[in-house]
Amino acid sequence: MAITGFFESKDYKSLLRDSLLAAKAVSPRMTFQRMAKACGIQKTYLSRALGDSKVHLSADSLHAAAHFLGFTADQREFLLLLAEEQRSLNPARRRELAERIEAIRRRYRKSESAIEATEVVREEAGGIQEYYLDPVLQLVHIFMTIPAYRADRERVRRELGLSKRRFGDACARLVKLGVLESGVDG
C-alpha cells in the first residue's frame, strides 16, 4: 500500500486486512495464519477480530501484526492510534486521539514526505555539467570524433547550422573541458 494511502485509512481493521492482502500479493508466505502466529493468537480469533466490529485486537497483538507486516515506526504509531480511537468510549479522549491521527496525516500529505531528493549544486563555471547541459557541445564533440569532419571544422559548423561565433565558443569550451584538443586542424 502506498504510504500516503496508508495514512488516509479510517479503520485499523481494514488497514490491517488491506496491508496483509497487499503483502500476500508480493509474497505468498504472508498469510493470516502466519500473522496470527506472529501476534500470538489463533487464526480464527484474528479473522473474527478483523471482521467483527465488537471484537478488537490488543495493543500488543496490533504491535506484533505491524512488525510482521514491516510497518515503519510512524505506520505502527498510526495503526495503534486508529485502534485506540475506535475502542475509546470517552469523547474527550477520542477527540484527542483524532487530533493526533490528523497531525500524522497532515505530515504525510506534504509532498516532501513522499519525495526523496538531494539538491543538485551546479559548479560556477565549467565542469562536466556544462557538457551535458549544452547539446551543442555534445554535437560538436560527436562530429569531431569522425575523421572526415575533424579535418574540416568549417564543414562541422555548416552541418550544425551554427554561427562562427557560436561554433568557436563551443570548440573553446570543449578544449577547456579537455574533451577536444586545441591543435585539431580545420
Image (cartoon, rainbow, N blue to C red):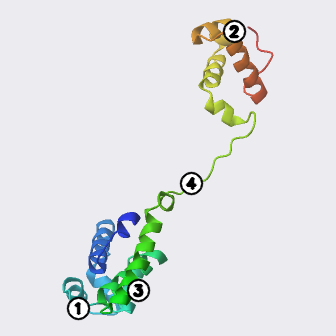
* Distance Cα–Cα, label 4 vs label 2: 40 Å
Sequence-wise first label, 2 or 3:
3
> In the image, which disc is placed on residue 55?
1
Sequence-wise first label, 4 or 3:
3
Residue 68 visible, this angle: no
Amino acid at dot 4: Ala
**Label 3 packing within 10 angstroms: few (<14), some (14-19), many (20+):** some
* Distance Cα–Cα, label 4 vs label 3: 31 Å
Q: Secondary structure at mark 3?
A: helix
Q: Which residue is mark 3?
A: 63
* Distance Cα–Cα, label 2 vs label 3: 71 Å
Sequence-wise first label, 1 or 2:
1
**Label 1 packing within 10 angstroms: few (<14), some (14-19), many (20+):** few
CB atoms at circles 1 and 3 under 8 Å apart?
A: no
Q: Which residue is mark 2?
A: 164
**Label 4 packing within 10 angstroms: few (<14), some (14-19), many (20+):** few
Q: Which residue is mark 4?
A: 117
Sequence-wise first label, 1 or 4:
1
Amino acid at dot 1: Val
> In the image, which disc is placed on residue 98?
none
